[in-house]
Image: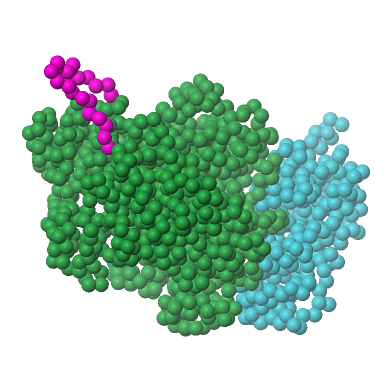
Chain colours: A green, B cyan
Amino acid sequence: MPRRNDIEKVLVLGSGPIIIGQAAEFDYSGTQACQALKEEGYETVLINSNPATIMTDTNMADTVYIEPLTFEFVSRIIRQERPDGLIATMGGQTGLNLAMELYGEGVLEQFGVELLGTDLDAIREAEDRDAFRSLMYKLGQPVPASDIVHSLEEGEAFLEKIGLPVIVRPAYTLGGTGGGLVDTWEQFRDILETGLANSPVHQCLVEKSIAGMKEMEYEVIRDANDDVMIVCDMENIDPVGIHTGDSIVVAPSQTLRERDQKRLRDASLTIVRALGIEGGCNVQFAQAPDSDDYYVIEVNPRVSRSSALASKATGYPIAKVAAKIAVGYHLQELKANVEPSLDYIVTKIPRWPFDKFASAHRKLGTQMKATGEVMAIGRTFGESLLKGIRSLDTKENHLLVDDYQASSAETLEERWKKADDERLYAVTEGFRRGYSVEAIHAATAIDRFFLEHMETLVRFHEKLADDPWSEALLEEAKKNGFSDQQIAKLWDTTEARVRNFKTENGIVPGFKMVDTFSDDREPQTPYFYSTYEEENESAKSDKPSVLVLGSGPIRIGQGIEFDYATVHTVWAIQEAGYESIIMNNNPETVSTDFSVSDKLYFEPLTVEEVLNVVNLEQPEGVVVQFGGQTAINLAEELAKAGVPILGTSLEDMDRAEDRDKFEQALKQLDVPMPPGKTATSENEAVEAADELGYPVLVRPSYVLGGRAMEIVDNREELKHYMAEAVHVHSEHPVLIDRYFYGKEIEVDAISDGENVFIPGMMEHIERAGVHSGDSIAVYPPRSLSDKVKQKVIAQTEQLAKGLNIVGLLNIQFVLYEDDVYVIEVNPRASRTVPFLSKMTGVPMAQIATRVILGETLPRLGYRDLYHPEPDRVAVKAPVFSFTKLRRVDIHLGPEMKSTGEVLGRDLTLEKALYKGLVASGMNIPRQGQVLFTIADKDKGEAVKLASRYERLGFQIMATKGTAAFLQERGIRVQEVRKIGEGSPDIAELIREGGAQLVINTLTKGKQPARDGFRIRREAVEHEIVCLTSMDTAFALLHVLEMMSFATEPVPALQGVNPEEKVTL
Amino acid sequence: MKGYIVLENGDIFSGQFIGEERTDVFGEAVFFTGMTGYQEVATDPSYRGQIVIFTYPFIGNYGVHPGKDQSEEWHPRALVMGECASDGYHYQSEETLASHAEKVGVPILTDVDTRALVKTIRKSGAMGAVMTTDPDTVVWNHYTSIEEKPLVNEVSTSETETHGSGDTHIVLVDFGHKKAMVDALCAHGAKVTVVPFDTDLKTIQAFAPDGLLLTNGPGNPKQLEEQLPEIKAAIMQYPTFAICLGHQLIALAFGGDTSKLKFGHRGANQPVLEKASGRVDMTAQNHSYVVDKASLEGTDLVVTHVNVNDDSVEGLAHKRLPIKSVQYHPEANPGPEDSQHLFLTIFQMIAEEKEVTIHA
């Protein structure tokens, strides 16, 4: 059936903020879907709460709503827009859940909105555990046997039938407390007995365990004509038991025979047909390694992270095709019946946030923990795997990691069994020590195929080390994916020398095309990867080109915002008449859609790999400003190698990034910054701090990006920090700055070297000390006086000119006693570029790109210094993934912790905040108990806060010290026992739902810190709102006050009781 | 040791031979795009006389297995690939690909830029090639092109064999059949008698079959021109289903023509449209020759299936007689089994025929 003409207007749901498990892949799929609908001439309406996405650009849909993805807001938009159809399968689980809710509440029916693509029955059948199982039984598709048992006897009878190992899950206990994997009968009896006892309904689910089997995935597409095909099959190197999002995955699958492959293929087709999927679908299987048995694990009736990966791995645009199927097309009409056939191997490696969260529980399991991923393409397994490792942009840039050489055999063996994010390196270290494939296979259950290849690579590594400057080995090393940097290390030389030696011997990489079908058609997809073989397929065009470096995997601190900026740069370069070439390695994003740029190189972002592309393409220059720190970090080496860096010069970037040079520059420009000193011993530190005055901000000089940074309030805390947190000595001094506990202001500006343009400035709700990425930003500022604004504008101009910025610039200021101090300058695109671009209508990244390419701001039409502020107010609120990361402290501080952001925009700040908080997933408590545990320094403010919460009808609870303090000041408080002071203590209270809101501020270096940590974790795990900054607590209060009608007595005649004005 | 594949057009690609020194090996260079199924490819008689290049860069990952051979022998003259797995683990694996190939005398050239090689063939068409250790001494007069070579007699059975014990008796005329065809027919309840490709009508009649299956096979269908009258006589008498070479022979028998594709279809992902239903199946294919669509005009054959990619003829049916054929491989092995249902066609035709006979 061709395009449906009975529908005109289509609503597309996005997936909202980036959280663990739902990341940039839905920007990619949503963008493709919107483009596909536009191509077909439908009027499209888009809703997504995430401003950092390409899909929420106003040119992506006819109407774009950046509003909370909740039933309340979406149904309002449906009433307003009256779409004919709804596409929910591009918005991840969020999209599906919303669609089910809209259907369930009758909204779809009421307004005549048809769910397009896969229908609700199919979605329900795929998502509902029981319905899915009964369908599988009907189809004769094996699922792990399971049953609900009520007694030990029942359990034993069932186990008799299905055999060990099994998983026991007590019903209705949080997080499955008391359950687990069971290998023996004895264990089974033990665990089942406790499980039954723990379960309030005395039930346990007993399920056959398939942990340790091979995990396979099939990406399937089906249309309404019942034509169905497989886009890609993938194999997880990590066996069943580790979430596929946390597994290293290869495509195509490597260890299945023709027959095994066919069996799973047929099962996929059967299941997808039986469900009646119309669009994309992912089917996951467990394949027994030692028999032909397999089990169906689950089905995702929508596009997913895996489908984004499959699209990038094959070049097949799954989301685009799925969107067209949703509006009626059949695969054959789209000429999309193409099962890609690969002639390379793809490896995906997850990127975990544990470099930021050192204390987090790193063990991998069924809960995904990675924030992002990288993909690498090679013609050998080694090339693919090692390129992937390099793409991660972590300190481990090779298969073998030096740190592991010191670990004991026990530690190593333990790490094989209990997989964590670094298991790969534990395995390779095992091979280095001479463990056998069989031994490691026994401990890890990783298929021997992969282990053998890893072992071969380790042996080759040793061979290479033993034979420096061997031309033959060098060639083999390059084919195996070894980096020049690694070879240089093994040969005790420099990377540049290795590079020269390579060139002298004619060992140069070529680029191969990813062309989806290695046979009949000869498509020209401008999508390449490097490899060391005979032929190079990438031809340099005659047009002058510009190379853009992307930002690599999504991680905390470097999120989708940078991909947004990258894509805009690519577009601007094209508009300026150049060929636009991009290098990146993140399979989830829009920037790695080959249709976005003129040419895509899917490569690690290393000096070696960038130089390879530069040598071939000879671009006019390289743009590094938009790829976050990843791209900036390459600039120096690239410049040394003679590559022109476009925009702000390297020296000037360095003046902003190097602390000493930065200080000098500020002094020169006469721009004030908080006074600071350096210290190389505890005594020096104490002296310096005494002189500066507390609080001070302390951090080691050798760590970048907010790590190990702390705010210290007094001498005792400083001593503790010096003793515990850093290893200070003369080469690694500690930096101590006066810390101004003031309002933080953030500015993004563009400069062409002579003229400066400031699209907007934002104020942060949380005072300085909370990382700017974790605080709520408000645009335009609502509490700054004109005088302050003028100071900010003037200093911005001074800095932009003084640092010779060409392109983007981000500055953070702190406002303290009416003076404005610079805290930080980033000579590059910042996290707030998409937010500000959308709220001001100024295409910042594009203007900056044009400026970088030589335009001037006035010629582009930007003659004012400061862009006029709109009357609507918008907030950018952070979104965290704390429930998914166990043992991570949620208190906000100088280190960034959020994974995503949402937008709230309305007429008043309170309304905007309400939207922002709701969109971020907060379940705003309207009444109930507010629990205060407040550090001494914040107690004064707590009184005001508590009394106003009380006035709104909340009951105030507090621990002893706080309670006494509040009581003395006339607030009715119920005292709560501290942890360990007897039952019920504060943790139990939270666990049992005795508080709807927890306000907890941090006391450092003492026992309460650990109690505080437990309180905060209890709150997060039980989904109770927990705020760790007084400022956020006030912001929420304002929202609540806005939402409530006050019930207060009529004022006495002789006085006035002015309603408290809202202040930030 | 260092080895080369030299193409008829003079292009040379270097690689490494697995195993000992060897003499030059000639064959037609063709490429296979499936990502698994190397064992099925190696034992498919249709690859007789060819040098098979695998586009997927790793071959041999899961070793060689018992019971997956499509015939008794390995048919390609040689195999070319990026990398040949040295170990190849699978719980049923008996041997590595490399050692088995060595045993059956099929040389393997690895470490070749197969993508560049395949691109050359795609551009210039399938052509003769030689695998050698010394590209300077290659003498082409040893090479006979596939077009001119009688290959079917090398792969067809010489004796009659019977498989299965079902009620429906099908005579399988063997031009180089794959075991999976016999298995598929037996699975649907047939007794299958495999007969040599040049079996005459009388002999076939003696088996009293309910229907015929003409199989796939190597080479140019026109090499079998002499056989055509006998084939035509047989298929006009019995419900017939034909695959690949068999399909081409049916076209030739009824006055159609065949031609050679530039570089053939060999892989596991060819989309084929069934015209009647409007449905597309992913199919397994392995052929150089194709039925010429224009040549069918005025014949009693109609096109039932076409290739979605290049619109080539993929299936035929006789306008009146129970004769149907497909260019692709519903028996799969290697490749998807999405069109397995086609094996029912022969049983349906037989059933309908019987009904007609009873009512007559």
Residue at 53% x, 46% y is A861
Q: Quadrant of the rendered structure where residue A1039 is?
A: top left
**A672 on left or right of A396:** left
Q: Quadrant of the N terminus of chain A?
A: top right
Q: Nearer the viewer, residue A482 or B247?
A: A482
Q: Is residue B287 left or right of residue A798?
A: right
Residue A916 horizontal/vertical position (percent): 37, 36
Quadrant containing the C terminus of chain A is top left
Which residue is painted at 45% across and 29% down in the image? A74
Up-down relation of residue A421 to residue A968 (above or below)? below
Task: Find out whether residue A1062 is within the magenta segment.
Answer: yes
When asked about the image quadrant of residue A694, the answer is: bottom left
Total count of labels: 0
Which span is picked out in magenta?
Answer: A1044-1064
Locate residue A1055, reporting x and y percent: 14, 20
Q: Is residue A1052 left or right of residue A317?
A: left
The image shows residue A599 at horizontal and vertical percentages of: 60, 58
Q: Which of the pair B39/A246 is nearer the observer? A: A246
For residue A956, above or below residue A493:
above
Judging depth in this view, the residue of A912 and A11 nearest the camera is A912
Indicate left or right for A1000 with A248 as reference. left
Question: Which percent across, then down, holds residue A212?
Answer: 41, 55
Whether B213 is drawn above or below A868: the answer is below
Main secondary structure of the magenta stretch: loop
Q: Is residue A994 above or below residue A718?
A: above
The residue under the point 69% across, 76% down is B4
Q: Nearer the viewer, residue A816 or A641?
A: A816
